[in-house]
């Protein structure tokens, strides 16, 4: 009886498929992408992510090195500031001492310049005393010049260190910007990879369904039609949705890889446990159920539930996507 009904349906299969294309809502059918193309794209995205992760590691190392150099420069600048303060203080103190000495020598005191000169006993003594005064003056002048040079060198060093620190700060800012941009790009690429991985899973499931359809005999078609009728009633859209879940399971590693094994998997479909499936098989599934089964085996899917693996009767109150009398998730 089942085979007779199946042959009658086959004679009208071309007309059935055309009719389905006209009456099924636009979002009910979706085209599964080719898995080989998706695998290549997924591999390319993964390579891009690996490269970006390597670049992030390199940037992180550069940032740590730059940050360490900035801290080192800060300590050098701090030391230079102390050296500069010390040099200025030494210069100021020597200048002050020199002025005191000159004032003492020229303005008064027991060893004033005039007294030194007038107390000379001879020309030779006078010249010796004059040379002594000149040596003191030259010493003060040379020491003052040395202190001034030290101060100028410390100032130059401090200025150089501050410029180097400024350049390092600019580099650090640039590296941080590169790191932020790369992190954002990595996040976007990871999102694309997740999207393509999802599409790849769908493609593999679709290909598994197509392979299952190639091997489907009359009994398999009848079995699929019967379970669609049991689970979805007379709703064609509901039947396609249930068929989508069944084929998703066929293509999923979480479930068996054949239509028969998926339907008869223990504890999954209540019509199997209740015996209703056997009753429908004995009397023969309705024509619309055969049409839905053929459509599903030909690759037709309900776009609303294309990622779903489970469904409940809608009266159970579960949350999910409602199609016909069932809620899918």
Image (tube, helix red, strand yellow):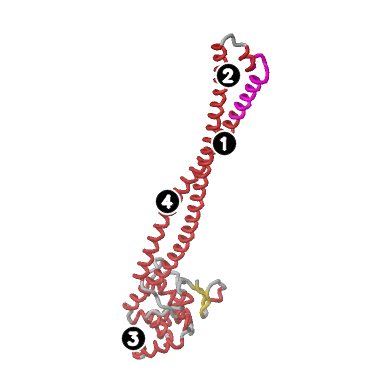
Residue 209 position in % (x across, y down) = 37, 75
> Quick one: label 2 or label 3, which is nearer the N terminus?
3
Upstream in the sequence, badge 4 or badge 1? 4
- Residue 58's disc number: 4
Give the mark nearest the N terminus, 4 or 3: 3
Image location of residue 6, percent across then percent down: 35, 86
Q: Please name the residue that numbered disc 3 is placed on.
A: 3
Q: Residue at x 46, y 61 (%)?
A: 185
Q: Are marks 3 and 1 in contact (CB under 8 Å)?
A: no
Q: Secondary structure at mark 3?
A: helix
Q: Secondary structure at mark 2?
A: helix
Q: Which of 128 and 196 lies nearest the eye of the viewer?
A: 128
Q: Residue at x 38, y 79 (%)?
A: 299
Question: Distance between the Cα atoms at labels 2 and 3?
Answer: 135 Å
Disc number lying in front (4 or 3): 4
**Residue 122 image position (x, y, % from top left):** 57, 10
- The residue to which callout 2 is attached is 133
Dot 4 crowding, Cα within 10 Å, few <14, some 14–19, many 20+: few
Left or right: residue 237 versus residue 219 is: right
Name the residue beneath numbered marker 1.
81
Task: State the image quarter where residue 194 is shown.
Answer: bottom left
Q: Which residues are magenta?
A: 91-112
Q: Position of residue 120 (x, y in %)?
A: 59, 11
**Residue drawn where x is 41% and y is 71% of the image:** 202
SS at mark 1 in the image = helix
Q: Residues within 10 Å of mark 3 (few under 14, many from 20)?
A: few
């Amino acid at each position: 009886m089942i085979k007779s009904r199946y042959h009658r349906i086959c004679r009208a299969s071309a007309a059935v498929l055309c009719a389905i294309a006209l009456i099924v809502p636009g979002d009910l059918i979706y085209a599964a992408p080719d898995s080989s193309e998706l695998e290549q794209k997924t591999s390319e995205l993964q390579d891009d992510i690996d490269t970006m992760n390597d670049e992030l590691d390199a940037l992180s190392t550069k940032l740590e090195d730059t940050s360490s150099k900035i801290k080192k420069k800060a300590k050098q600048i701090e030391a230079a500031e102390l050296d500069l303060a010390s040099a200025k203080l030494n210069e100021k103190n020597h200048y002050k001492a020199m002025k005191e000495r000159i004032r003492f020598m020229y303005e008064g005191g027991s060893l004033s310049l005039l007294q030194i000169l007038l107390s000379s006993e001879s020309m030779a003594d006078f010249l010796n005393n004059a040379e002594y005064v000149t040596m003191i003056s030259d010493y003060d002048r040379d020491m003052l010049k040395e202190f001034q040079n030290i101060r100028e060198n410390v100032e130059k060093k401090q200025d150089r260190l501050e410029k180097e620190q400024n350049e390092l700060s600019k580099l650090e800012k640039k590296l941080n910007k590169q790191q932020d941009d790369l992190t954002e790009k990595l996040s976007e690429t990871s999102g694309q990879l997740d999207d393509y991985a999802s599409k790849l899973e769908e493609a593999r499931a679709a290909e598994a369904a197509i392979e299952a359809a190639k091997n489907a005999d009359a009994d398999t078609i009848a079995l699929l039609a019967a379970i669609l009728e049991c689970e979805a009633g007379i709703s064609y859209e509901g039947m396609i949705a249930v068929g989508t879940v069944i084929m998703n399971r066929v293509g999923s590693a979480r479930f068996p890889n054949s239509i028969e094994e998926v339907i008869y998997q223990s504890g999954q479909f209540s019509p199997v446990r209740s015996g209703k499936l056997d009753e429908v098989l004995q009397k023969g599934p309705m024509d619309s159920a055969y049409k839905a089964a053929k459509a599903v085996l030909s690759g037709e899917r309900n776009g609303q539930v294309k990622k779903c693996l489970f469904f409940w009767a809608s009266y159970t109150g579960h949350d999910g996507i409602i199609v016909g009398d069932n809620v899918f998730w």
